[in-house]
Image (cartoon, rainbow, N blue to C red):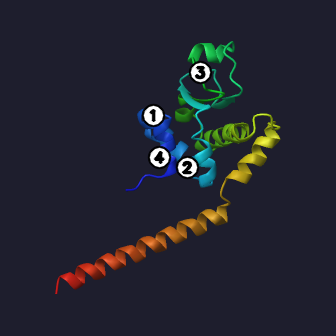
């Protein structure tokens, strides 16, 4: 199976070691994003870390990351990191999927505008507006899924016809 931008982002973020549930949640949310937004998440100023801390938030974006911040002292991000996205592995395992997905969406809604323009407004309402601008609409997702299914059926039908033609 061909890899997608989502697979590449998850590999870059080192998510292969995460649980299947954790990966499934990340993949579902990242698949909601337009490809251009996924490419933006490749920015070297973004660093994604997973923690297992019962008191840490489910998903939280720290920006800009100042080296004196406690989280920066604990996690020691790379020198070029300006946005530190922290995901809490405990919450991804224990909390309701819908809640965790909403937390991840909110954090990405803060990350994306910062990567695009660090001085841009970045309040919670701005984050939700950004998420909506960067994510597929439900009807678009349904149409995209239908187009992919149709293409897969045509491809399978074509392979069957070729196989039948070679078997004569």
Please state, as top left, top right, bottom left or bottom right, where the N terminus lies in the image: bottom left
**Pair 1/4: label in front:** 4
Q: Which mark is residue 85?
A: none
Which residue is located at x 66 percent, y 61 percent? Answer: 138
Which residue is located at x 51 percent, y 42 percent? Answer: 9
Total numbered labels: 4
Q: Would you say the residues marked 1 and 4 are in contact, meaning their CB atoms lie under 8 Å apart?
A: no
Q: Would you say the residues marked 4 and 3 are in contact, meaning their CB atoms lie under 8 Å apart?
A: no
The secondary element bearing badge 1 is classed as loop
**Pair 4/3: label in front:** 3
**Pair 3/1: label in front:** 3
Please state, as top left, top right, bottom left or bottom right, where the C terminus lies in the image: bottom left
Position of residue 152 relative to residue 35, above or below, is: below
Which residue was labeled with disc 1? Answer: 18
Which residue was labeled with disc 4? Answer: 7
Separation (CA) of disc 1 from disc 2: 15 Å
Which residue was labeled with disc 3? Answer: 79
The secondary element bearing badge 3 is classed as loop
Which residue is located at x 62 percent, y 54 percent? Answer: 34
Question: Nearer the N terminus, badge 4 or badge 2?
Answer: 4
State the image coordinates of residue 142 (x, y, percent, origin top left): 59, 66
Question: Nearer the N terminus, badge 3 or badge 2?
Answer: 2
Assess disc 2: are there few (<14), some (14-19) or many (≥20) residues with their C-alpha within 10 Å of its C-alpha: few
Question: Nearer the N terminus, badge 4 or badge 3?
Answer: 4
**Pair 4/2: label in front:** 4
Position of residue 87 relative to residue 141, above or below, is: above
Assess disc 4: are there few (<14), some (14-19) or many (≥20) residues with their C-alpha within 10 Å of its C-alpha: some
Separation (CA) of disc 1 from disc 4: 13 Å
Position of residue 8 relative to residue 158, above or below, is: above
Assess disc 1: are there few (<14), some (14-19) or many (≥20) residues with their C-alpha within 10 Å of its C-alpha: few
């Amino acid at each position: 199976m061909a890899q997608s931008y989502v697979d590449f982002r998850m590999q870059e973020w080192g998510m292969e070691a995460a649980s299947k549930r954790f990966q499934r949640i990340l993949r579902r949310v990242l698949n909601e994003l337009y490809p251009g937004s996924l490419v933006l998440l490749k920015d070297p100023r973004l660093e994604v870390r997973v923690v297992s801390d019962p008191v840490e938030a489910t998903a939280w974006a720290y920006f800009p990351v100042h080296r004196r911040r406690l989280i920066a002292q604990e996690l020691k991000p790379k020198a070029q990191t300006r946005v530190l996205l922290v995901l809490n592995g405990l919450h991804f395992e224990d909390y309701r999927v819908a809640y965790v997905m909403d937390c991840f969406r909110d954090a990405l809604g803060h990350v994306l505008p910062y990567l695009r323009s660090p001085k841009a407004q970045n309040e919670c309402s701005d984050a939700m507006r950004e998420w909506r601008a960067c994510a597929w609409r439900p009807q678009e997702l349904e149409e995209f899924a239908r187009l992919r299914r149709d293409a897969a059926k045509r491809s399978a039908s074509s392979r069957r016809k070729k196989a039948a033609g070679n078997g004569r």
